[in-house]
Amino acid sequence: MMKRRVRVNNLSRKTVILQEASVAATFLQRLRGLLGHKGLPSGRGLLIKPCRAVHTCGMAFPLDIAFVDGEDRICYLREGMPPYRFSPVIREASYVLEAPAGTLRRAQTQCGDMIALEMIAD
């Protein structure tokens, strides 16, 4: 995965969504995304920035997807998105979080929640 990593906190619910998310910020990182991964460990995920739509073509596992706007507010959620699906284009989204299926429910995450990204030192 990528080198930059962040912790994703849900400020509205006072929960941690992801203990560690790799950041895909370059064209090639965003293009590759999670392709080639057989799964994601619990608490791990991917932050894709910028991003307004995702797909799960070629994926081997379902994902929870959270679209986040420029003010760090969740503007669209898709829980358990199966392989070989396309999300809608979410125009107000600035970036997307991809997490193992069940992550958003466990963190009690809902549309409208505010999140905070906390850099993880190497």
Image: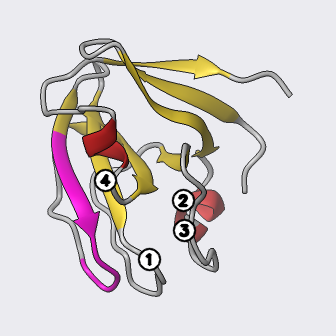
Measured as percent of width and height from the top left, residue 121 is found at 80, 22
* Pick the front one: 26 or 5: 5
| Type of the residue with mark 1 | Phe
* Pick the front one: 70 or 59: 59
Measured as percent of width and height from the top left, residue 31 is found at 54, 68
Cβ–Cβ below 8 Å for labels 1 and 3? no
Q: CA distance from mark 1 to mark 2?
A: 18 Å
Cβ–Cβ below 8 Å for labels 3 and 2? yes
Quarter of the rendering occupied by the C terminus: top right
Q: Mark 1 — residue?
A: 61
Say which residue appears at 15% left-offset and 43% top-offset.
76
Residue 86, quarter of the rendered image: bottom left
| Type of the residue with mark 3 | Leu
Q: Mark 3 — residue?
A: 31
* Scheme of image coloration: secondary structure
* Pick the front one: 87 or 31: 87
Say which residue appears at 44% left-offset and 52% top-offset.
99
Q: Mark 4 — residue?
A: 65
Task: Assess disc 2: are there few (<14), some (14-19) or many (≥20) residues with their C-alpha within 10 Å of its C-alpha.
Answer: some
